[in-house]
Amino acid sequence: MAAVNATSWEVWDLSGQKLKSVPQHLLTPVSVCTSMDLQRNKLKRVNSISRFTNLIELNLSRNKILEFSLEICSLQKLQTLYMNQNNIRSIPEGIFPHLRSLKFLKLSNNRLAKLPSDINQCTSLTYLELSKNHLQSIEPLVGLTKLRELLVEKNHLTELPSQLFQKGSCELTIFKAMGNPLRCPPEEVCAGGVMDIQSYFLQMEENPNAHTARTVKTMFLGSSMAGKSTLCRSLREGKPVTVAVKDRTEGIDITQLYIQDVRFLLWDFAGQEEYYLTHHVFITPRALVILTVDLASYSITDPHSFKDQIWFWINNIQLRVPDAVVMLVGTHCDQCRDLDEVMEKKKDIEEKVNTMLANRKIVLKYQKKNLEENADPCLYMDQVDELDCLLDYNLKVLDLLTLDCTKTEDIVRFRSLILKCIQSESVFLCSESILPQSYEEVEQAIHILATLEQIPQHGIILLEELSDLILSHVTQSREHLHSILRFLLRYLHRIGVIIWYEDIDMLSDRVFIHPSFLISMFKTIVRHDLVQQVEAISRDLLMREGALMKQKFIWVEDLRCRGTLHNAALRILVRRELEKLVEDDDDLFREVVGTKREEGIILTLLQHFEVCLPTLVRSPMNPEAPEFIPGEKHWQSAKESKRDPDGACLFPIYLKDNLAVCQKWGENKQDDVRVHMYFLPEIPHGFFHRLVIKTCSLYSTHWVGKELCLLCCGNRLTLVRQRNKDGDSFIEVRCRRPEKDKEFWQMWDLILAVMSKIFVLSRQWPGLTQQVHTPCPERGCLHYFTWRDWQELNNTDLYNLVKEEKLVCQGGHTRRAELIFPKAVTSQ
């Protein structure tokens, strides 16, 4: 670091200097520094900071600070303080009363278990971020009268202080608390914002007899024919129930069960691979997962048996809901040789599961250690923080329960054990929500309306109509009902009673009172035998759609060879299923199925959840694709491009090969520019298919295969490839090396756009971690260049990831920097 004149500088940037302490030469003479940036260093303690009495802004984020220094008391002019992403476990009393000017405080990503009782004496504070700590109470914040924005996401909060949200007590307008096991108010109330929280506490005051809702979403997962449906239905009936093979679950079945004061919503998920892609739509946090294992077919000696029946499912649960509780249930015990065989398999499964979970922790710790031992660990602090979050998760897998579903006593024992699991707060903390009596009244009104058939049989109703119907059954005013209803719909959606897609503009005004109806529509399209379903379309159904038999043959060929389902075929299939469930209703058919002019509910949802992508009929690309120019407002996305109004949708999950992509791309070349994004423990099932849809929506010229996707922007091609079979799991983004230096930035813009889509998609799997490497371009070299933290950098920063003109790998091979990392290159 170059020497500075301490008497003339007001702003000091000391970030990323690998500092272990504040440099001594800055301490004399007494500094007039007003802003100091010490982020991304190696500070464990903050010493001598008290001499900087003129400081207005201080950034100590992304260090290794263990304690909140008492010296900060002396910074009485301080207005902005960053101490996020450290290892602070506690804050001493007596500091905040001295920080009378402090307005902005960021303490997220630390290990705080509690707040000092005098933090409310920091009366000028307007912004406070405490997310990703271990806080169990925020009671000390009551009294911060100027506080406007408060973020407490991902802590251990179960209750919020009502005084904090009383009108006039503070100026709070933004409050975020997602990711907490909140009971009072429930998380769904907090999601509505400060006004909904205020309404909740007002209702609690007016209705002191609070209702404790104990509803648990219980998800049955497992391989096909593992006995999920038999177990689920036997549990519901309280006695053995036989399920025929032809009656096995397709998609998802939903039923209810009451045991004492707990309502169980039983979600039975189909085990066939084709249904996995839609499972993520319905698998939500804070649910009990019952994973069924067919003990009769399970083999101790065959490693594939454990991987297919158990490892696959636990792995996907850990990626999607890493704090879940999983109850292992061994089925088909009556088909095993004897009790000794059952016990032997039980022991083997439990040992392998424990080893699997322990190995994941070990791998994460080694990954963290490797990053921390890097030559410049400050450049990888975001990745280290992410690994810390993964290490904090605690997927709980209970010991395997062996059941003979042909015995009533085993079903009764199963019921008892599930109830015991729910009642144990140490195992399943989040099964309770404390609700005002008025909230229960509204929920009961919805149930009564459905029972009296005042809500249509199919259960689809406009939000405004539902509100009007409820008003006649409750004592609430319209104003109060509006706030209550939106919370209640969020809550009922989370536990699985109804479905309300609040975040989908086209559907936010509709409520699906019967989720099973919507799921029945889903499974007409996303199913293991879709080709056979299209082949079975009768001539009468074709004529109603105005189609011919020869068109059906084209539909079948396009689906089988190109993974493309014509919209006309989709409408016929969904309409055929609708007619089994409801009486003839043209308005409903148009709303659900759609028409040649507009998409219906089903197609809207399939596209929203990235199951399919609109495409031209019998064409792999859009030849009129415009060139992608970042930042240009006139650029048109694929979704906005003109396409056949009665076209088709591409379902990548139904593709069988990569021939079209390989033919267009040709052979890989040694000088191709490559970036590898590695995933631990593996790329989630369906991840690549959804990535294809995300990226193809961005670049309208594209070719798609089972494990390859080729994107075209202008005259530049980018290959995206998945490797998820042997060895490390990664997605490769590959481009041809530009011929001219000035084209490098265009190539990197294309690569970074794909990488950004991968990163956004990966956030939907909280248990997933990733690293980015650029392989050494030298033939046969196994070394690579690791990317530093890049997600929070802007385009200008990204093109300055490296200052060097050339880089050398650990094998001694030298390459131009712009072949390895995004780097701005100016032509000579």
Image (tube, grey):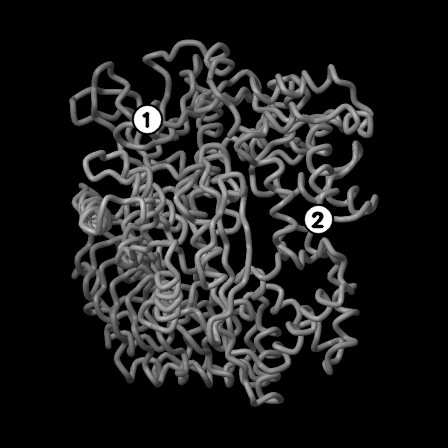
Describe the element under mark 1 as helix, strand or loop: loop
Q: Which mark is residue 820?
A: 1
Of the residues shown, which amino acid type is indicated by label 1? Ile
Q: Can you give x and y, in whole percent of width and height, for residue 213 in the image?
A: 51, 75
Q: Residues within 10 Å of mark 2 (few under 14, many from 20)?
A: few
Of the residues shown, which amino acid type is indicated by label 2? Met
Q: Can you give x and y, in whole percent of width and height, for residue 792 in the image?
A: 41, 47
Residue 607 vertical placement versus 342 (above, below): above
Query: Is residue 635 something that shows in the picture?
Result: no
Horizontal placement of 561 versus 308: left or right? Answer: right
Horizontal placement of 680 versus 157: left or right? Answer: left
Given residues 627 and 52, the one toward you in this image is 627
Residue 71 vertical placement versus 5 (above, below): below
Q: Quadrant of residue 482?
A: bottom right
Given residues 455 and 1, the one toward you in this image is 455
Q: Residue shown at 31%/25% (left/top)?
A: 817
Query: Is residue 50 something that shows in the picture?
Result: yes
Given residues 530 and 203, the one toward you in this image is 530
Q: Residue shown at 55%/30% (left/top)?
A: 529
Residue 189 vertical placement versus 245 (above, below): below
Q: Can you give x and y, in whole percent of width and height, for residue 18 in the image?
A: 20, 50
Residue 144 vertical placement versus 709 (above, below): below
Q: Can you give x and y, in whole percent of width and height, for residue 56 in the image?
A: 39, 68
Q: Count the marks: how many?
A: 2
**Residue highlighted by disc 2:** 506
